Image (spheres, rainbow, N blue to C red):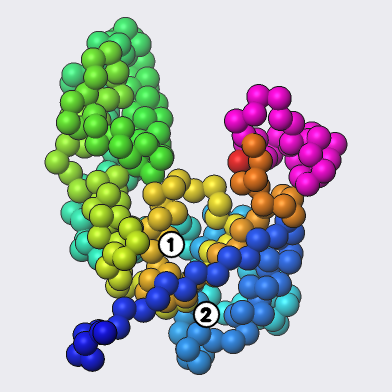
Amino acid sequence: RQDDDMPVRPQPDFRLYPSNDLDVLAGVLGELLRAPGDGDWWREEWVLVPQFSMRRWLQQSLAERLGICANVRFVTPGEFVEQALEANLGAAPRADRLMPEVLRWHLLRELDANPPQELASFLSGADPRRSWSLAASLADSFEKYQAWRREDLLGWERRAPRGSAQAQLWERIGSGRAHRARRIGEYLERFGGEGSETPSGLPSRLFVFACQNISPEVLQVVASQARAGRQHFFLHTPPRAYWGDLDRWASDYRPDQDDRFGGENPLLAAWGQAG
């Protein structure tokens, strides 16, 4: 029996809407937006979208269906992660975040002062643009690694393997900093597992639209909002059948020959294998 004085933990509220038609998903989203969350018409609605082009298309589609698309905040999964981390872990020092526009300067300094042996011959030329071009490319790669290869980055900080220029550079720059890769791990330790704490500072209603191509750990951060409120997840999947039913380990399996997934359709098969 639960003590009457103990606070009641809200049950996670996660609702999934799969469809192979984006117009259908946009229509369902529009109908849900007609009714304000908790009856509060002034509350800003949050919609996660994968990129800017999807945002523009969805804005236009909602405006055509509803007559207006207002008081809707469109954010990318990365922006939502930053909001969740800052609201629950506190703001990280700006220099520690290692965003690409800052990280490229750290990399440039390291490449000029103490380049890894594997890169010495490439950087030894007279053209100074080589160092800058490499630093900018590496900064963009490390930005993706903080979402997709988080464990690798943290492992490199403990001990960078010999013969890996990327690992050596990250060890010198990332060690001890409160960058996103480390903070995502800290967040998931508190809010990522079943029965974990309820995060704060997140919207009470969240719409996640066609954001299936994000890293598993970023997806866990997004999903944690369902403990603090209600989450509507719109999954764009090419076939009507559940994509996870594909036997990906069968060497002789051909999705383009499976009637459940579109039959003789090479493009659909290729899309499915990539997904």
Disc 1 marks a residue whose amino acid type is Ala
Please state which amino acid type lies under the numbered disc 2.
Asn
Image check: 84 left or right of 28?
left
Please determine whether, in this image, residue 96 is positioned above or below residue 114: below
Task: Point out the tag, 1 or 2, that comes first from the N-terminus.
Answer: 2
Residue furthest right in the image: 264
Residue 267 image offset from top left, x and y in percent: 77, 37
Is 271 magenta? The answer is yes
Please tell me which residue is depicted at 26% across the width and 84% down the height of the picture: 1
Secondary structure of the residue carrying tag 2 is: loop
**Residue 56 seen anywhere in this rendered image of the structure:** no
- On screen, 190 above or below 256? below
User: In this figure, which residue is indicated by the disc labeled 1?
Assistant: 223
Residue 165: percent from the left, percent from the top?
A: 29, 19
Give the Cα distance between marks 1 and 2: 23 Å
- Whether residue 177 is visible to the viewer of this picture, yes or no, is yes
Q: Is residue 226 left or right of residue 99?
A: right
- Is 17 situated left or right of 12 in this image? right
Q: Quadrant of residue 170?
A: top left
Q: Say which quarter of the image contains residue 77.
A: bottom left
Question: How many other residues sit within 10 Å of disc 1, few (<14), some (14-19) or many (≥20)?
Answer: some
Q: The C terminus appears in which quarter of the rendering?
A: top right
The kind of secondary structure element at disc 1 is helix
Residue marked by disc 2: 71
Up/down of 34 relative to 113, above or below: below
- Nearer the camera: disc 1 or disc 2: 1
Residue 6: image x %, image y %? Answer: 21, 85
Above or below — where is 162 with respect to 226? above
The residue at 40%/76% (across/down) is: 11
Q: Residue at x 60, y 80 (%)?
A: 33
Magenta stretch, residue numbers: 248-274
Q: What residue lies at 25% left-to-right and 60% top-to-bottom?
A: 190
